[in-house]
Image (tube, grey):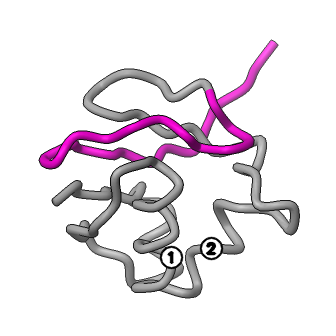
């Protein structure tokens, strides 16, 4: 099963240790993780179901570019890492 890992900064506010979930797409995996830790959803996903601007998700080390639909397929043993995106100027 894919493994979802949340950032430490989020874990300071909500108990959300790494979790193995079922899912064949990034959307399925993230929905399963949010079901497991309901408080996480609001930090990661907006009311339209899209990733919030400050969130970046990597699947097996590669940045996911589909922020709207999260249709990217994930392998059975994928590592999904959620990060707080940084910006600067």
Asked where in the image residue 88 lies, by quadrant, the reply is: top right
Asked if the residue under mark 1 is in contact with the one under mark 2, i.e. CB atoms within 8 Å, the reply is: yes
Q: Position of residue 7 (x, y in %)?
A: 42, 55
Q: Secondary structure at mark 2?
A: helix
Q: Position of residue 10 (x, y in %)?
A: 50, 66
Q: CA distance from mark 2 to mark 1?
A: 5 Å
- Residue lying at the far top in this picture: please name it: 89
Q: Which residue is mark 2?
A: 41
Q: Residue at the spot x=51%, y=69% of the render? A: 31
Q: Secondary structure at mark 1?
A: helix
Total numbered circles: 2
Q: Which residue is mark 1?
A: 34
20 vs 56, left or right, is left
The N terminus, quarter of image: bottom left
**Magenta span: chief secondary structure:** loop
Q: Residue at the spot x=13%, y=47% of the render? A: 77
Q: Position of residue 74 (x, y in %)?
A: 32, 41
Residue 84, magenta (yes or no): yes
Front residue of this view, candidates 89 and 58: 58
Q: Residue at the spot x=53%, y=79% of the render? A: 13
The C terminus, quarter of image: top right
């Amino acid at each position: 099963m894919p493994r979802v890992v949340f950032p430490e900064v989020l874990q300071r506010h909500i108990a959300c240790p790494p979790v193995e979930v079922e899912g064949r797409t990034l959307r399925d995996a993230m929905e399963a993780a949010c079901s497991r830790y309901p408080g996480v959803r609001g930090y990661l996903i907006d009311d339209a179901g899209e990733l919030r601007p400050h969130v970046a998700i990597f699947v097996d080390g590669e940045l996911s570019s589909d922020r709207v639909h999260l249709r990217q397929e994930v392998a059975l043993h994928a590592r999904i890492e959620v990060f707080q995106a940084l910006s600067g100027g």
